[in-house]
Amino acid sequence: MLINLFANSKPLFLAPMAGLSDLAFRRLVKRFDCDVTISEMISSNALVYESEKSLTMLEKDKSERPFIAQIAGSNKEIIKKAVEIINKEENIHGIDFNCGCPVNKVIKQNAGSALLKDLDNLKSLLDIIKTNNKVGTTSVKIRLGFNECEIEKIINSLNELELDFISIHGRTRAGMYSAKVDYNAIKLAKSLAKTKIIANGDISYENHQMVLEQTNADGLMIGRNAVGNPWIFSQIKGKFNEINKSEIILTHFEFMCDLYKDYACSLFRKHLHEYSKGLANASEFRNEVNKINEPKIMLNTIKEFFDATNY
């Protein structure tokens, strides 16, 4: 069923992040006014050939409405089969195509941001997704270009497809995650595009209003600045009341335990590193939790540290 992603003015999206935007984290940010959640990037090859394992990445919480599945790949037949698999799932409201991932193992498969070098191929793959998509919206996540900014060329090409929205990470692939984000390039994309544009890249509570004004984007997509700060969506909407953040962290760990059982402790460490950043004795805390594999001990250690810092 087609759902209106833009029912709220300037909606806030959680960016798909491998190993971070899992069901537990998405479940958490929905408590803090995130409008749209997206799955972690799912390999179309894995979804087709290792479907049982990859299908778990399509699982969602009942609060995730709307929820979008993101896939990556470069083989037309496999992309089509992946879309057909997603079509059989319930309560998915759109399919997003990843054309922005900059990591080498994805690039070597001619997927992710590698597709920005071959716009005809990119369009043909997106057309397959749109033609076969039965669950809802069709969208794409891109960067400004591969080695250099070619956003005008990219947007003019994508305009032929009549997509539901385009999310743009304001760096080239060469810029990875460290180059300065070019919000003016996103502004140019917005002026050229025949569809909605979602701005992405280094968006924080402090700069979100500037990004909206500078880019004229239809919404914002927040990724790494939500890790260790899942309440950022409520902050941006002016709805965040100062509450005991340690309780939020414990809730997140509880969600991780529900999802990963015995592996929750090891997988939660990366989140604890972010939650503790900048706090007194954070280094000692990180060293301690890196050795803990027992959920009850982890829970008590988390509570003691964050309560002591009045977090």
Image (cartoon, grey):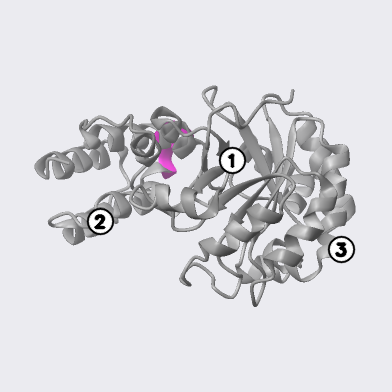
Q: Which residues are magenta?
A: 257-263
The quadrant of the rendering that contains the N terminus is: top right
Q: How far across and how far down the image is residue 196, in percent?
A: 66, 43
- Nearest the eye: 264 or 156: 156
* 163 on left or right of 252: right
* Residue at image point 22% right, 30% down: 243
Q: Amino acid at mark 1?
A: Ile
Q: How far across and how far down the image is residue 238, in percent?
A: 33, 33
Q: How far across and how far down the image is residue 87, in percent?
A: 79, 32
Question: Residue under circle 3?
Answer: 120
Note whether 141 is above or below 134 in the view shown: below
Question: Residue under circle 1?
Answer: 38
Q: Amino acid at mark 3?
A: Asp
The quadrant of the rendering that contains the C terminus is: top left
Question: Which badge, 2 or 3, is on the more N-terminal residue?
Answer: 3
Question: Residue under circle 2?
Answer: 277
